[in-house]
Image (cartoon, grey):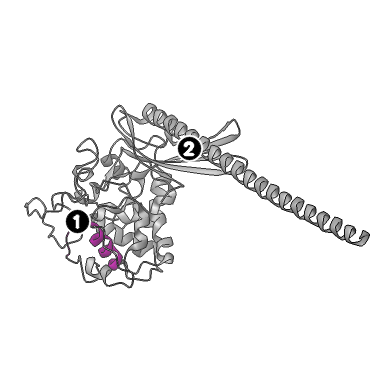
C-alpha cells in the first residue's frame, strides 16, 4: 500500500511539472509575441516620424527654391537652392537633402513624335499651360501630323531630340545589347499613341503581346525612367548604362536644357545636344561658365563660338534655356537603426513652388 502511495505521488509530481512546463511555454510565447508587437509599433512610429520629418524638409526646400529662384531672370548654380551637402540634426534623427535641376539632364519624354513646328522634340514645353504644356492634361496631345511649311522635317525624319539621344547612346553606351537606333525607336514607340513602328527596329503592342509574359506598351508619356526596364530586349546591363544619362519629367515632352545648371558629370548630354562638340570640349564649356551663368542662350553660344566646330542652327538652340521649372529633391532621414528616403518632383512658378509628384524610397 505504501508503494502505491509513492507511485501516486510521483504521477502527481510529473503532472504538476508538465502543467508548469506548459505555463512556461505559454508565457514565453506570449512574451515573444509581445516583444514582436512592441518592435512593430516602434518601427511604425519611427517610419511615421521619418515621413513627417521628410515632408517638413520638403516644405523647407520649397521655400528655399521660391526665395532663391522664383521670378529671377536666370536659374544658375550660384543661387542658394544649389547648395549641396547640408545635414540638419534633429531629435533622434538627422535630415539631409539634395536638390537637382531636372532640366539639366535628358528628358526621355522629349522623344515623343512632335508637331513639326516644335523643334524641341515634343509638345509645347514648360512655358505653356501654366508651365506644364497640354500634355500634362492629355499625355497623347500634340501627336497629330502637321505639315506647316515653317519646318521642312518630314514626319519620319528624326527630331533634334531623337538625334541627340542617338548621339548620346553612340558616345556613352557602347556596350548596349541592341543597336542605339533600335533603342531610340523603341522608346519613341513606347511613348506615341499609334501602333505604327517608328522604324525597322521599333516595337509596338504586337511585339510586347507576343512575349512569353505579355504586356502592353504604355503609348503615353513616361512617369519614371525605370520604365526603360520593360522596353523590348532591354537588359539590366543596358539599363545600368543608360539610366545615369537620362531622366523623366512626368507630363512634359519638351527638351529645354538649362546651360547654367549643368555639371561636368552631365557633359555627355551637352556634347550629344550640339553636333560636333566632343565630351572633352563640353566639360571645358561647363568648367569655364561664369559663376552666375549666362544671361541668354545666345550669350552661351556666342561666348563659346571658338569651341564649336560648326554653328548651331535654330533647331539646336531651341533645345536650350537659361531658366528651369522642374527640380528633384531627394530627402533622407536617418535614425539610429533606420533609413527613410523621399523623392519629390517640384515645379517652380513665378510666385510659388508646387509638388508635382512624390516617391517614397528614393529615385525611380
Residue 154: percent from left, percent from top: 12, 60
Say which residue appears at 7% left-offset and 55% top-offset: 147
Q: Secondary structure at mark 2?
A: helix
- The one nearer the camera, 334 or 103, is 334
The residue under label 2 is 51
- Position of 326 relative to 8 (above/below): above
Res. 313 in view: no
Say which residue appears at 76% left-offset and 55% top-offset: 18
- The one nearer the camera, 155 or 191, is 191
The residue under label 1 is 113
Q: Main secondary structure of the magenta part?
A: helix
The reply, left or right, for residue 230 in relation to residue 52 is left
Q: Secondary structure at mark 1?
A: loop
Say which residue appears at 37% left-offset and 37% top-offset: 293
Q: Quadrant of residue 180?
A: bottom left
Q: Quadrant of residue 178?
A: bottom left
Q: Quadrant of residue 94?
A: top right
Q: Is residue 49 magenta?
A: no
Question: For the N terminus, which image quadrant?
Answer: bottom right
Say which label, 1 or 2, has the lower sequence index: 2
Kindly report which numbered mark, 1 or 2, lies closer to the viewer in this rendering. 2
Q: Which mark is residue 147?
A: none
Residue 14: percent from left, percent from top: 81, 57
Mark 1 vs mark 2, CA separation in Å = 39 Å
Q: Contact, CB < 8 Å: mark 1 with mark 2?
A: no
- The one nearer the camera, 339 or 348, is 339
Neighbourhood count class around disc 2 (C-alpha, 10 Å): few under 14, some 14–19, many 20 upward? some
Magenta part of the chain: 181-195
Amino acid at each position: 500500500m505504501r508503494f502505491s502511495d509513492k507511485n501516486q505521488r510521483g504521477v502527481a509530481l510529473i503532472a504538476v511539472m508538465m502543467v508548469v512546463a506548459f505555463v512556461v511555454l505559454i508565457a514565453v510565447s506570449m512574451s515573444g509575441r509581445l516583444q514582436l508587437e512592441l518592435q512593430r509599433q516602434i518601427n511604425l512610429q519611427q517610419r511615421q516620424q521619418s515621413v513627417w520629418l521628410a515632408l517638413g524638409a520638403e516644405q523647407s526646400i520649397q521655400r528655399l527654391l521660391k526665395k532663391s529662384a522664383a521670378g529671377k531672370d536666370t536659374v544658375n548654380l550660384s543661387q542658394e537652392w544649389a547648395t549641396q551637402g547640408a545635414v540638419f540634426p534633429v531629435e533622434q534623427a538627422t535630415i539631409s537633402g539634395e536638390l537637382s535641376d531636372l532640366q539639366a539632364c535628358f528628358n526621355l519624354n522629349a522623344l515623343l513624335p512632335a508637331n513639326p513646328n516644335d523643334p524641341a522634340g515634343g509638345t509645347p514645353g514648360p512655358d505653356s499651360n501654366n508651365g506644364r504644356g497640354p500634355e500634362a492634361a492629355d499625355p497623347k496631345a500634340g501627336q497629330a501630323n502637321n505639315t506647316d511649311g515653317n519646318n521642312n522635317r518630314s514626319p519620319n525624319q528624326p527630331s533634334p531630340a531623337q538625334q541627340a539621344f542617338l548621339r548620346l547612346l553612340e558616345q556613352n553606351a557602347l556596350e548596349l545589347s541592341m543597336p542605339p537606333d533600335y533603342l531610340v525607336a523603341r522608346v519613341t514607340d513606347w511613348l506615341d499613341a499609334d501602333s505604327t513602328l517608328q522604324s525597322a527596329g521599333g516595337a509596338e503592342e504586337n511585339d510586347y503581346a507576343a512575349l512569353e509574359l505579355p504586356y502592353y506598351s504604355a503609348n503615353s508619356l513616361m512617369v519614371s525612367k525605370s520604365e526603360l526596364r520593360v522596353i523590348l530586349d532591354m537588359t539590366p546591363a543596358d539599363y545600368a548604362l543608360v539610366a545615369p544619362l537620362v531622366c523623366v519629367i512626368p507630363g512634359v515632352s519638351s527638351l529645354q536644357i538649362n546651360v547654367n545648371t549643368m555639371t561636368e558629370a552631365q557633359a555627355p548630354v551637352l556634347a550629344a545636344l550640339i553636333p560636333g562638340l566632343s565630351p572633352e570640349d563640353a566639360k571645358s564649356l561647363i568648367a569655364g561658365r561664369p559663376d552666375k551663368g549666362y544671361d541668354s542662350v545666345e550669350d552661351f553660344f556666342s561666348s563659346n563660338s571658338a569651341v564649336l566646330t560648326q554653328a548651331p542652327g535654330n533647331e539646336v538652340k531651341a533645345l536650350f534655356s537659361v531658366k528651369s521649372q522642374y527640380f528633384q529633391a531627394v530627402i533622407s532621414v536617418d535614425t539610429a537603426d533606420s533609413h527613410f528616403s523621399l523623392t519629390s518632383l517640384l515645379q517652380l512658378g513665378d510666385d510659388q513652388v508646387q509638388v508635382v509628384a512624390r516617391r517614397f524610397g528614393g529615385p525611380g
